[in-house]
Image (tube, rainbow, N blue to C red):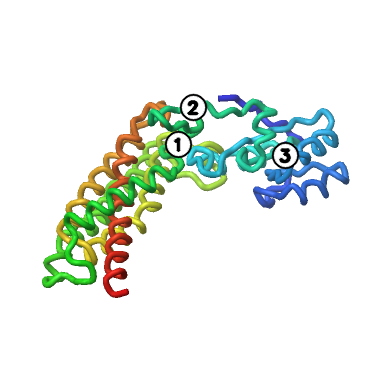
């Protein structure tokens, strides 16, 4: 990774209470007065804006971040990039989405190399930097294939509820309770343990390092990812269990819970390892099919019921 030089005394003497981002329109106003944008990340919305900014700046340093909005890796470094902008107020930090501004991506050689995950499917190489990849139409079709199989093969008659509702929901509710327990004991505690290990709990905010230790960062990312999945997991499990089949819903949610914990443990253990080499994909893809398969089964099941009463 590129190492930035230490900021000079002039660069350190910059306003601290500034917003981390600014639109290109705001930046142009400052540049028009030949004033830098201290501590700000300028978001580009048009390809011509970069040329206007570079012409105005002359020989000043410019840092351009080319990102993809769907990339988890790009989202993960977003705050770090804004910290750099504050640390180097005499530099200009720019941000551009390569999907919105493909011309800039080509101009600065930000290319998409094919990543073969399927014989007929190419994905941007940048996907390999994240634990996930964009959902394609083919994926959505596969989710509904799984959902249709669940609806027709194991689902009760559409439009009927379980005769023994408590018995049907017993296992799904136990699994959801275990999710909460494992989240608290494993995911949350892992962050605290990592912070204790690196003596971060004894420091005030201003004494914390600009870049947190990788072990702490990975533990926080694993915890955050669990939170991101929690709502959809709870909703899909309960809907599937009530409307389709509670016992199968309990089994599928249990498998999902186990895979998600393996995912989190693998994520936390990836210190010094790239996301691509960490092996997270072997957990994320089955989890997507379990979660979206249950959700798709609800859609199929309720569609079948709607057709019977139409």
Distance, label 2 to label 1, CA atoms, is 15 Å
Residue receiving disc 3: 89
Residue 264 in the image, given as x and y percentages of width and height: 32, 41
The answer to which of 19 and 246 lies nearer the viewer is 246
Q: Residue at x 41, y 31 (%)?
A: 120
Q: Are marks 2 and 3 in contact (CB under 8 Å)?
A: no
Helix, strand or loop at label 2? It is loop
Label 2 or label 3, whichever comes before in sequence order: 3
Q: Alpha-carbon neighbours of circle 1 within 10 Å: few (<14), some, or many (≥20)? A: many
Q: What is the quadrant of the C terminus in the image?
A: bottom left
Residue 276 location, quadrant: top left
Distance, label 3 to label 1, CA atoms, is 29 Å
> Looking at the image, which residue sits at the far right?
33
Residue receiving disc 2: 114
Q: Alpha-carbon neighbours of circle 3 within 10 Å: few (<14), some, or many (≥20)? A: many
Q: Residue at x 38, y 53 (%)?
A: 227
Residue 45 in the image, given as x and y percentages of width and height: 71, 46
């Amino acid at each position: 990774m590129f190492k930035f030089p230490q900021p000079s005394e002039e660069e350190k003497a910059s306003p601290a209470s500034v917003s981390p981002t600014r639109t290109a329109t705001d930046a142009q106003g400052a540049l028009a007065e030949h004033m830098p944008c201290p501590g700000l990340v300028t978001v580009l919305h048009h390809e011509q804006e970069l040329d206007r900014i570079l012409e105005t700046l002359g020989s000043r340093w410019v840092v351009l971040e080319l990102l993809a909005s769907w990339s988890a890796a790009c989202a993960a470094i977003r705050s770090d990039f804004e910290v750099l902008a504050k640390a180097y107020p005499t530099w200009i930090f720019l941000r551009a989405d390569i999907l919105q501004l493909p011309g800039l991506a080509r101009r600065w050689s930000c290319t998409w190399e094919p990543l073969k995950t399927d014989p007929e499917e190419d994905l941007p190489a940048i996907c390999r930097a994240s634990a996930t990849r964009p959902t394609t139409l083919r994926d959505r079709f596969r989710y509904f294939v799984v959902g249709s199989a669940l609806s027709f093969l194991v689902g009760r008659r559409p439009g009927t509820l379980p005769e023994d509702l408590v018995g049907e929901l017993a296992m799904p509710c136990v699994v959801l309770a275990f999710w909460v327990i494992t989240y608290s004991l494993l995911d949350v505690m892992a962050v605290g343990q990592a912070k204790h290990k690196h003596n971060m709990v004894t420091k005030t905010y201003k004494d914390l390092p600009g870049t947190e230790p990788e072990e702490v960062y990975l533990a926080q990312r694993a915890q955050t990812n669990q939170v991101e999945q929690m709502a959809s997991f709870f909703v899909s499990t309960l809907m599937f269990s009530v409307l389709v089949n509670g016992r199968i819903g309990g089994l599928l949610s249990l498998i999902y819970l186990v895979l998600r914990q393996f995912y989190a443990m693998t994520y936390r253990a990836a210190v010094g390892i790239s996301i691509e080499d960490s092996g997270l994909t072997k957990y994320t893809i089955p989890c997507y099919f379990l979660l979206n398969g249950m959700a798709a089964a609800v859609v199929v099941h309720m569609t079948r019921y709607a057709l019977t009463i139409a």
